[in-house]
Amino acid sequence: MTTRVGIEVSIAIADAVKLCNPDVVAAYPITPQTHIVEHLAELVADGELDAEYIPVESEHSAMSACLGSAASGARTFTATASQGLALMNEVVYVAAPMRLPIVMAVANRALSAPLSIWCDHSDMMSVRDTGWIQIIGENGQQLVDNIICAFRIAEDKRVLLPVMVHLDGFNLTHVIEPIAFPEQEEVDKFLKRTPYPLPLNPDKPVAMGEFAPPFIFTESKWAHEMAIVNSKKVIKEVWNEYNKKFGRQYTPVEKHHSDGAKVVLMTMGAVGETASVAVDEMVAEGQSVGQIRLRLWRPFPFEELRESVKDTDILIVLDRAISYGGPGGPVASEVKSAFYDQEKRPKIVSIVGGLGGRDITVAGFKDLINKGIKIARTGSKNEYEIYGVRE
């Protein structure tokens, strides 16, 4: 049984965290994620959530507190955005190789300068090599579901890695949507407690994250790489089990009219729903157009991506971040690498758009797709195109 309510997505995420019964929440407020941690503070203060809430002095301190709590075996949650994630960056790098199963919601927001409080994916891309699992939601329901799944994934003894769950700032954080919440008893059964295998214990001292000389450093990094690559199997298992229990299926690459389509648009995040309307209209007009949505950014789903566009001639990749001085969009760069040594591969067109929260309308997505088709057929002098820029 589920309860369906109209609720702000940030509040819904906090309520989803409550369903997961965390032991520790350590957080610092920053727009646009503040409502998440504010509501968690209210839940703790009102006695609705039995957790230690640590109001720290910075995001760096928030993640530092999370390291300590997770290392002691406590179920741990935090949230941040943009410059907060940048300030947290030093400690974000520590959490993953120490194999600490922290869950963090990241309300995606542009990195300054110039200062912006609106959404793009520059903050998400700034931490792509920190070794965290990264899941991207498109609407409130997906985020509630994936917060619950994230704890299950992170704490699986085959994984033991931290997980970021990404949501678009303002486009999702401050929007009211109808969301179905599972019952507490159902979540408890799905998210059983699994003791952390190497908790800090004064009676059994262990060293964690200590100095590693060159003769062992490479092996430690390779172990981390194998852990995150192998986590994809567990992620898919958890998503499949969640579907069986709650009736909502998630996959690393989700398809929309893409089977057999000659032109496919690839999106990440909330803009995917606007893009899907454009795709629907183009399909209704008789055009062979489809869409794929990237749900899993790390580990990158190479096999699933290749399978999803096996019959596609043109793949248009929309990035909401720029890799400055490089090939344009970081997602497009990853996609190109996925097909580099494949005998059959689509023509890949990299388009950057929606920076700093700039809207792309349904009509805009139609125009973007048509521009991508033209570039694929006639070529371009640029490595990538930036959509809607005023020169």
Image (cartoon, helix red, strand yellow):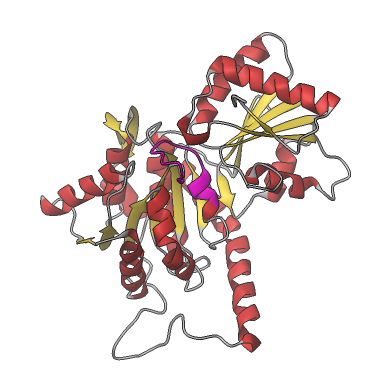
Residue 361 on image: x %, y %: 52, 19
Q: Image check: 322 left or right of 53?
A: right
Q: Looking at the picture, tell me which residue is in the foreground, 314 or 101.
A: 314
Which residue is depicted at the point 61% across and 81% down?
Answer: 217
Q: Looking at the picture, tell me which residue is in the foreground, 46 or 266.
A: 266
The image quarter in which residue 21 lies:
bottom left
Residue 240 on image: x %, y %: 53, 46
Q: Which span is picked out in magenta?
A: 111-125
Residue 318 on image: x %, y %: 63, 34
Residue 67 counted in the magenta span: no
Q: Image check: 51 left or right of 227?
A: left
Residue 113 counted in the magenta span: yes
Which residue is depicted at the point 43% across and 64% down?
Answer: 155
Q: Image check: 336 left or right of 70?
A: right
Q: Image check: 352 left or right of 127?
A: right
Q: In the current view of this chain or complex, which residue is farthest to the top?
A: 285
The image quarter in which residue 22 lies:
bottom left
